[in-house]
Structure formats: structure tokens, C-alpha cells
Image: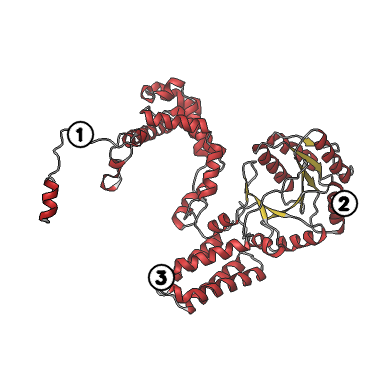
Amino acid sequence: MFDSLTGKFANAFTALRNRGRIGSGDIDEMCGEIRKALLDADVALAVAESFVAKVNERAQAALPDLRQSTNQSQAIFAIVNEELISILGGAARRIRLAKNPPTVIMLAGLQGSGKTTLAGKLAHYFKSQGDTPLLVAADLQRPNAVNQLSVVATNAKVPVFAPEVGNGVGDPIKVARDGVAFAREKFHNIVIVDTAGRLGVDIELMNEAKAIRDAVNPDEIIFVVDSMIGQDAVRTAQAFLDGVGFDGVALTKLDGDAKGGASLSIAKITARPIMFVSTGEKLQDFDLFYPDRMASRILGMGDIQSLAEQAKRAFDGDTAAKLEAKFAEGDDFTLEDFLEQMQAMKKMGSMSKLLGMLPGANSGAMKKQLENFDEGEIVRTQAIVQSMTPSERREPKILNGSRRLRIANGSGRSVKEVNSLVDRFSAAQKMMKTMRNGGSIPGLPGGLGNSAPQAGGMRKPPPNNLPNKKKSRSGNPAKRAQGEG
């Protein structure tokens, strides 16, 4: 969503780096470019003006010291990063759990903002943390809202309290109140109440939201906002804050191609933190919001921490330990191991999104590669491997022509694709052997592979038949005499 903003920030910093010795006018020019970039991205005028003013003030004040630095532009980049983190909310905040369960979370927002989908994602997240969430279907206005929440709950494998069919029938205040009582009776420690929205802010919407709020006394009210609605995001957030009040914000549809800058203004204008982000339709397309990580991504530095956390969640600890042990003991990496790795990667979600967290992902060349990335390649590769017998996965050398034809037919792929996969896997297997044995890896300059550590952290000892290098003599007679003694 923030590709355009990232590109314009990058251009501003590139121009600054090319200046060499930076002066006051250079900082003014950079700030002008940043201001234009923020406004083009739909960041609220007041937020953009405040941000640029602070960056300019801090950079100008630091200029005398910066002139002594060998990397002046990097110091200014750090100032911009700090101020960007500030407008995004500063420190991350999490759900405040009630001292006496259940913790009640009420979702509010306009119709179409993604409340129902977010409710399921939030429940799925809490379940993965060991909690026992319950979804409450208190949106009785939107057609099929109750049914949609039930489907989402089934996918997330969490229970739903839905005594009314909805579609304009039933009392949402009673449903919300009874849902909390049901959760307390059945020992659910988290309750997520999905409420109705409207196409726009009106008195009826506000009155119903306030009535539900007063009936269930929620521990947290989360305002759910569609990141793609532009400046209306800020106006709607302010209206909900004044009319109902909320404690935090959840941004949805961050995978869209809209400007999205208005959503970044919400934390600064409402003084309420962004707590969650949703980046797709799948349950896994959800994450906690970290202002510093979002700032890092906007500035083109990637988000390695989130990438590592997603990998840790996806890759089973026992599987990782088994592969590490195999590598240390000298066992071959097999197609069965490869299949396990692919299945774990699929749990992490879209590969293009994951690769987009790498530093420089928005640069011209890498961005083009990501746009052309074929997500179906993993599925096709998995189909080929799954069409093999266990013995074929363990010993790819037995894959003769007839076996490869059978695998191609079984996976719906061509023999050429099967051959390509086997060849690429064999090459990777050989490279792993080379690394394990301390050999040189083809393509690395200077034989860097020769210094690869061995199993147990030991390097391969030199052969015994190599002659010892002649020891040089010191030019100092006293030291030489001491050494020879």
C-alpha cells in the first residue's frame, strides 16, 4: 500500500546523499519533498505539517555537529525515522486483559470496514496464544452478517454465540449482554463482540454502538477502519471517538493499492494507538502493529523482525531440530525434508508479501521480480513431490524415465517440469554437502566456502602431509634469542 510513499522517501534521501556536504538549504529542500510525498499519500495536512516541521527543526539544530560527521545523510535519516515512529504511535500497545475474565473486546466501525473478518482473525490469534475466545454475533442488521461470522468462526475453529438469525431481526444489545454471560458461564476468557456498521456515520449507528458499550462494559473498544477509504478514515475515526469512544485502532486491507496515508494519521489525530493490521482475507493475514517496524518498511528498510517471527511460527521446532541434526551428522537432505519445508512456507502466507519485508523490496529491480513472482509455483512443486513414493523422495537417484512419467501424470505436470525439479534439488543437495565438508561453493569469490564451519562448530583440519610453514625470524636480536631459547 505504501509503495509510492516509500519510493518518494527514497528519492528524497538519494538526492540528499548526492549533495555530499549538507547545508541548511539542502535540509529545507528534503523536507519540502517529504511534505509533498506525505500529502500525495493522503496523510492529513496537520500531521504532515507537524512532521515536517519537527524533522526540519531537529535536522537544522543538529547541522553543526553533522558537518563533522562522515555520513551526514544517515544522521538525518535517523531523525526522520524517529519522527515517523512518533506519528505512528510511538510504542506498541497490546490488549489489556481483565483481572476477572472474560476480557470483553468490542469491535466498531463502518459497514464494509472488515469488522467480521477481523473478528475471526483476532479470535484465531488469541487461540494460538492459548486463550479460549468466543465470538458474539451482535451485527443483526447487515444481510448474512451472522452467517458470515459463523463461517469465519468455523474456519478459525472457535465457538460463536449467535442466538439470532439477524437480517434485521433481533435485539443486538441483548445478544451482546447474553454473549458475555454465556462466556462467563462456559469459562471463555476472551469475548469478541462483532457490532453493526452503516455506510456512513449516523445517529442510529452511534446510539446502537453506545447501547452495546454500556450493556457489556468492554475492556477494549477497537475501531476498525478500511485503509483504502482515504481522508474519510480520519473523519470517521474522529466521529467514532466523539460519539462512542475507542481505545485502539485496527487497520484492514493494508494489502490494497490505495494511497493509505490517511490511516497513518489516525494515531496522531485521535491519540489512540494502532494495535492490529490486516493484510488479506486469510486468517494468517493478520499481525500486531509495531510503529517502529512500519516506519522501517515505509523508509525501505524492510521488516526482518516480523519475517523472522512468522517463520518461527510456521516452522515446527521438532522439524527444525531434526533437519539441524541431519546436517550435523552428515545425512542427506531428502525430498521428504524439502516437502516439509514447503508445507511450512505455505503456512507463512503469500511469498510475495513475505519477500516484500526484505530491505530494498521496493527498489525497481526487486519490486519487478516480486510483481512477477508466481505463487502457484510452490503448489505445483508440492504436487510433483507428493506424487512420488516415499522411497523416491528419499533416493531421487532411482527416478528413471518411467517413474518420472508416472510422477508427471500423477501431478498433472510435464516430464520437463519433473526433470527440472529433480535437477535443481540435486544441485542444492550437492551444495549442502560441499558446505558441510568445508569445500568451496561455486560462484563465491575467493573460495569463501573453504571457511565453512563443520558439524559441531569445528573446521576441517588441514591434511597431515602438508609441509609446515617456515617460521620467520625477528629482526630484534634480543627477541630472536629469547624465541630460540
- Using residue 231 as the reference point, say whether residue 38 is left or right of it: left
Between 318 and 99, the one nearer to me in the picture: 99
- The 10 Å Cα crowd at callout 3, few under 14, some 14 to 19, many 20 or more, is few
Query: Which image quadrant is residue 244 in?
Result: bottom right
Q: Nearer the viewer, mark 2 or mark 3?
A: 3
Distance, label 2 to label 1, CA atoms, is: 82 Å
Where residue 211 is drawn, which disc sits there?
2
Mark 1 residue type? Pro
Q: Is residue 412 visible in this depiction of the protein? A: no
Relative to 393, does residue 306 appear above or below in the rendering?
A: below
Q: Which residue is mark 1?
A: 463
Image quadrant occupied by the N terminus: bottom right
**Image location of residue 275, percent across then percent down:** 67, 52
Q: Label 2: state its secondary structure.
A: helix
Q: Nearer the viewer, mark 2 or mark 1?
A: 1
Q: Which residue is mark 3?
A: 69
Mark 3 residue type? Ser
Instruction: Work out whether mark 2 precedes mark 3 in sequence or the reverse, and give the earlier one.
Output: 3
**Image location of residue 347, percent across then percent down:** 56, 37
Relative to 128, does residue 58 appear above or below in the rendering?
A: below
**Image location of residue 345, percent across then percent down:** 52, 38
Between 139 and 168, the one nearer to me in the picture: 139
Between 473 and 31, the one nearer to me in the picture: 473
**Image location of residue 300, percent across then percent down:** 50, 58
Q: Residue at x 37, y 27 (%)?
A: 331
Between 409 and 141, the one nearer to me in the picture: 141
Q: Residue at x 65, y 68 (%)?
A: 47
Instruction: Work out whether mark 2 precedes mark 1 in sequence or the reverse, and give the earlier one.
Output: 2
Q: Label 3: state its secondary structure.
A: loop
